[in-house]
Image (cartoon, helix red, strand yellow):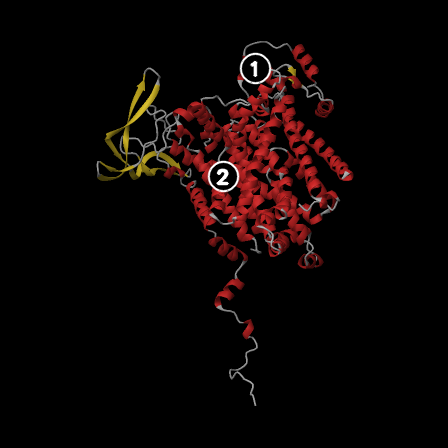
């Protein structure tokens, strides 16, 4: 006779519901925690995020990072080539240093030639005093992270037509170039959410109208439209006003993609029971959209917004390059690149084009970071 | 198909009207008009300006009318193919523009073809070899093309072309053919000069196209019908080309709506650097000198280029995809 096996342990009706600590952690995590965990697995996005964070942090302390002030001129070093950074001099370790430059004017071609003089070793000083500046407009100081040797020069990326250090100017330019995209995206985000929200929530003729408007705006090629609008900025405006006008223009034309995303999501979500429940309890449309519907896809929106920042940065660069965007004394990467406008620059002073490197790096970083963010925000992957 | 065609054309009409209004508002935006800056210029040179003459000029150019009337006159002219009068050149806009509009169309069409030709094989390769070195490498290449500002790439290519081939690659044809009537040699010369701008403008659009084609292909490749085809023993090439590729092609064509404005934008700035005889350089000059009708006709032409391009892509899509043709509505 066979006997049934009976487990002697006491019966626990919740045994199947019990979770391991990891599972518990996963199920109890908030949406943002989940996103962060997913993003952490995406190496490229993470690296890009760190690069961007570093760049944005640098704009807080541009004055300290740049060895020279924005407008410091070295009249005897016009179009000087980059001075390479060395560590060893004649087999002996000296620490980071540059060789001094000997200047010669070729009287026949009137070309300036600079040759590194290997007898003049100029060690780089760290945490030293140089050009003075007002830190955040408050504190008068002259501390720099690194500066040239006493009486020496330090042009890591060469100098421009007026003998200004290109590296310092690039560090300062970061401030403008990176914030253009940021302010622009805030504007386009605000317009996109409001317009897309109205279209998606109300549907009907509002939706139809918004759709048509978006279609029309999208059929304009961006750059000529930006060009036309920035040509309309009054010439009498101060450079700072032009800067804000430009970000406004960039933002005003970029919201269409976001508005479309908001609209299609809202159209789907407003039929959900929880939206109905909120409506039955007497919540007004504004509250339903902002409180109940938007949080559902906010993360997705932020990811898409990240992806549209690079086009603004490139737009600013292009406009400034054409002389329709920012003007000196405001310095952005695009303004720096205007110097590289003619073919002579490419042939004789190729280092003038180096501001293109941060442009490429930042645009790539934003693209990869945005991609990773979007994947992380997608709950179905 | 006919019903679809008619509906699609009817949608275009209000779009075009709205575009003309927006264009008109934009060219009116700068304070003052061409005459006022002209007067200021004369006065700065110490010349006296006769008020009667100014008034006559104003009346002649219709600048004394209200904005609405000016718009109606301008838009009415557009309908009859009259683009208005260029103040700067003292000629009708149609004369000033000359070949430029045609060359712009050639340039943009060539660029679109280039983007398709490059993005198509790369996109398919990336999708079928997902996460391989080839996939990563090609994707990165595409992204670098996207991230490099067009104008700088144009400059560098201009320089390299000069050094390596010893040719001047600026312009769109050999200087000998400028203002000459069209001939076979001139066409060949244009083709010879076309590759640099096409390459430069194309680089910025290719990355996006590759990404989209790759994503679409990946979606299709994981669908059950592909598994079925494989289970039935279809060869790898046939399995790829016959079904998933066809479906993935739809967004490829539909996406021209995004691609065209981007290409037109790119060509505007590249033309400036390479001094191509297209609309770009003249548009910027017209914007700066407030030559409003000239600027306006360029803007409206560029916008129309995209609208018509989208129309053509919708036609192609309807031809490709019976779901759209039969009026179930696009699922975009």
Q: Position of B331 compared to A233: left or right? A: right
- Is residue B49 shown above or below A318? above
Circle 1 residues within 10 Å: few <14, some 14–19, many ≥20:
few
**Spatial separation of the CA atoms under disc 1 and disc 2:** 37 Å
| Residue B141 appearing in the image | yes
The residue where tag 1 is placed is B41
Res A83 quadrant in image? top left
Query: For residue A299, which numbered disc appears in the image?
Result: none
Tag 1 subunit: B
| Residue A305 appearing in the image | no
Q: Front-most of B109 and A198?
A: B109
Query: For residue A179, which numbered disc appears in the image?
Result: 2
Circle 2 residues within 10 Å: few <14, some 14–19, many ≥20:
some
Q: Residue at x 32, y 38 (%)?
A: A146
**Label 1: which secondary element:** helix
- Total residue callouts: 2
Tag 2 subunit: A
Q: Position of residue A298 (x, y in %)?
A: 58, 51
Q: Position of residue B183 (x, y in %)?
A: 61, 18
Q: Residue at x 21, y 38 (%)?
A: A91
């Amino acid at each position: 006779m066979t006997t049934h096996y009976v487990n002697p342990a006491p019966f626990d009706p919740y045994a199947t519901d019990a979770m391991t600590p990891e599972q518990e952690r996963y199920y109890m995590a908030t949406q943002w925690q989940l996103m962060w965990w997913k993003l952490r697995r995406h190496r490229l996005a993470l690296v890009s995020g760190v690069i961007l964070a570093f760049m944005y942090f640098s704009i807080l302390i541009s004055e300290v990072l740049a060895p020279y002030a924005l407008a410091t001129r070295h009249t005897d070093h016009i179009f000087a080539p980059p001075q390479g950074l060395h560590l060893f001099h004649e087999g002996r370790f000296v620490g980071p240093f540059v060789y001094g430059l000997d200047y010669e004017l070729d009287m026949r071609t009137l070309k300036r030639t600079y040759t590194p003089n290997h007898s003049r070793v100029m060690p780089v000083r760290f945490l030293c005093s140089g050009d003075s500046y007002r830190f955040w407009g408050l504190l008068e100081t002259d501390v720099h992270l690194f500066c040239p040797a006493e009486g020496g020069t330090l042009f890591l990326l060469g100098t421009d037509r007026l003998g200004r250090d290109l590296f310092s100017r690039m560090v300062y330019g970061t401030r403008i170039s990176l914030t253009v995209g940021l302010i622009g995206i805030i504007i386009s985000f605000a317009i996109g959410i409001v317009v897309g929200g109205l279209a998606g929530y109300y549907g009907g003729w509002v939706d139809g109208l918004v759709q048509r408007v978006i279609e029309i705006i999208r059929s304009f090629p961006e750059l000529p439209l930006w060009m036309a609008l920035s040509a309309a900025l009054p010439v009498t405006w101060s450079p700072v006003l032009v800067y804000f006008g430009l970000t406004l223009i960039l933002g005003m034309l970029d919201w269409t993609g976001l508005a479309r995303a908001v609209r299609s999501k809202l159209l789907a979500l407003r039929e959900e029971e929880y939206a109905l429940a909120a409506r039955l309890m007497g919540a007004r449309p504004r509250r339903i959209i902002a409180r109940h519907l938007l949080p559902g896809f906010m993360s997705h929106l932020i990811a898409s917004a990240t992806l549209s920042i690079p086009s603004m940065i490139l737009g600013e660069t292009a406009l400034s390059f054409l002389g329709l965007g920012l003007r000196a004394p405001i310095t952005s990467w695009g303004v720096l690149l205007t110097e590289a406008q003619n073919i002579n620059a490419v042939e004789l002073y190729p280092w003038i084009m180096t501001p293109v490197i941060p442009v490429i790096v930042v645009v790539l970083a934003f693209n990869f970071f945005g991609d990773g963010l979007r994947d992380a925000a997608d709950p179905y992957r | 198909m006919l019903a679809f065609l008619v509906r699609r054309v009817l949608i275009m009409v209000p779009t075009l009207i709205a575009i003309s209004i927006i264009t008109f508002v934009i060219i009116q935006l700068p304070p003052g008009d061409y005459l006022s800056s002209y007067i200021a210029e004369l006065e700065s040179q110490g010349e006296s300006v006769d008020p009667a003459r100014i008034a006559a000029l104003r009346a002649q150019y219709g600048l004394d009318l209200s904005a609405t009337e000016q718009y109606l006159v301008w838009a009415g002219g557009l309908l009859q193919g009259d683009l208005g009068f260029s103040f700067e050149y003292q000629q009708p806009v149609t004369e000033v523009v000359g070949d430029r509009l045609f060359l712009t169309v050639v340039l943009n069409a060539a660029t679109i073809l280039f983007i398709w030709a490059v993005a198509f094989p790369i996109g398919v390769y990336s999708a079928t070899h997902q996460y391989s070195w080839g996939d990563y490498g090609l994707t990165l290449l595409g992204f670098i093309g996207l991230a490099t500002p067009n104008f700088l790439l144009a400059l560098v290519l201009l320089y390299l072309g000069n050094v390596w081939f010893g040719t001047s690659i600026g312009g769109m044809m050999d200087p000998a053919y400028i203002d000459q009537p069209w001939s076979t040699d001139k066409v060949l010369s244009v083709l010879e000069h076309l590759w640099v701008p096409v390459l430069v403008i194309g680089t910025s659009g290719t990355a996006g196209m590759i990404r989209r084609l790759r994503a679409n292909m990946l979606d299709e490749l994981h669908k059950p019908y592909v598994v079925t085809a494989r289970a039935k023993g279809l060869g790898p090439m046939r399995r790829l080309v016959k079904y998933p590729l066809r479906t993935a092609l739809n967004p490829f064509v539909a996406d021209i709506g995004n691609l065209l404005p981007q290409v037109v934008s790119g060509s505007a700035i590249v033309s400036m650097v390479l001094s191509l005889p297209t609309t770009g350089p003249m548009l910027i000059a017209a914007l700066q000198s407030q030559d409003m009708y000239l600027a306006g006709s360029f803007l409206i032409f560029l916008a129309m280029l995209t609208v018509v391009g989208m129309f053509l892509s919708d036609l192609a899509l309807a031809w490709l995809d019976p779901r759209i043709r039969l009026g179930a509505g696009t699922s975009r």
